Amino acid sequence: MDRLGYHLPILMYHSVAFLFDAPFPECVRIRPSIFAKQMKYLKDHHYNVIEVDFLFQEIVEGRSLPPKTIAITLDDGYLDNYVNAYPILKFYGFPTTVFLITGSIGIDPKFMTWDQVREMEKNGIRFGNHTVTHPHLHVASLEGARKEILEAKEKLSQEVQNPSQIFCYPFGEYTIACQRLVQECGYEGAVATSVDGALPLADRYAFRRLKISDSAQNKFIFAFEISGYYSAIKKIQKKIKYFKRHAVQVALALFEFFQEV
Ligand SMILES: [Zn+2]
């Protein structure tokens, strides 16, 4: 999926709420008005919005997806997803996957109830496993991590009709052992965050996503982020910054090299 720097964009949202409504930091929150504008942008510009499960299936089967293909995900299962995001997604008919912290659903008032989850499921929203308590899986014991994944999987299968076959790492943190574990637990793939790790970028057990927050309120920034080349350009920017920081050392090394030649 990283052909010529292109990486199929999977958008990652968390809380969709106004500042005064949401007890979440700005980096994991987007105002409903901006979210609505972004969804309208996808519609107006004829984006091919597909479900994450379908996207993974196409990757596994080696099929290429049409240009402007994109997937939408929301993490954690906040109540504001039901109140603010769901009506917009329903209006546009965008298939979306919400990854739930199953231990908080119907218990913590900041989160949705299972009835709300089921109502959304009937209207095109799919729900996936984001563990029971949102632990730091990469430092958890293997048995502890397995329990978190399997108990959440069991709960989802009891509460919804058709849970997603894709797993979502809490905090986007994972190790190779976590990836194997997710596979052993019967998942077809997993999504991480936009942080570049040392592991293969297009690995289907750690597929990168783009975190979208209020910072993407500008239409042009959003368009750039969803172009599929955002990460590649970020990497080039990093290299330029690195070069600038080490310009003196690079110049000296070149000078020495040419003196020896
Ligand atoms: Zn999360």
Image (spheres, helix red, strand yellow):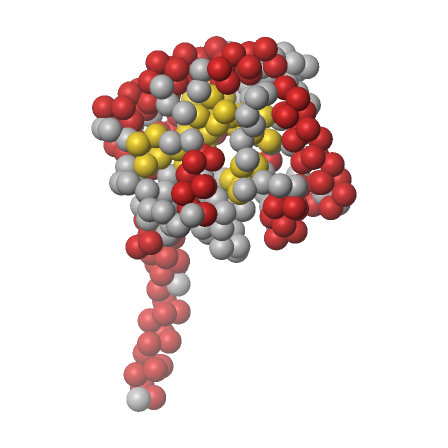
| One can see residue 3 in this view | yes
Res. 117 image quadrant: top right
The quadrant of the image that shows the C terminus is: bottom left
Position above or below: 142 against 44: below
Residue at 54% across, 46% down = 205
Residue 123, horizontal then vertical, whole percent: 45, 15
Residue at 55% across, 35% down = 165
Q: Is residue 77 left or right of residue 222?
A: right
| One can see residue 17 in this view | no
Res. 214 image quadrant: top left
Residue at 33% across, 76% down = 254
115 and 83: which is toward the camera: 115
Residue 50, horizontal then vertical, whole percent: 38, 31
Position above or below: 142 against 133: below
Residue 204, horizontal then vertical, whole percent: 50, 47
184 and 197: which is toward the camera: 184
Position above or below: 154 against 36: below
Instruction: Give the residue at the far left of this rendering.
Output: 45
- Give the number of callouts: 0
Q: Is residue 233 left or right of residue 115?
A: left
Q: Is residue 122 left or right of residue 169?
A: left
Residue 29, horizontal then vertical, whole percent: 47, 23
Residue at 33% across, 54% down = 3
81 and 185: which is toward the camera: 185
Res. 65 image quadrant: top left
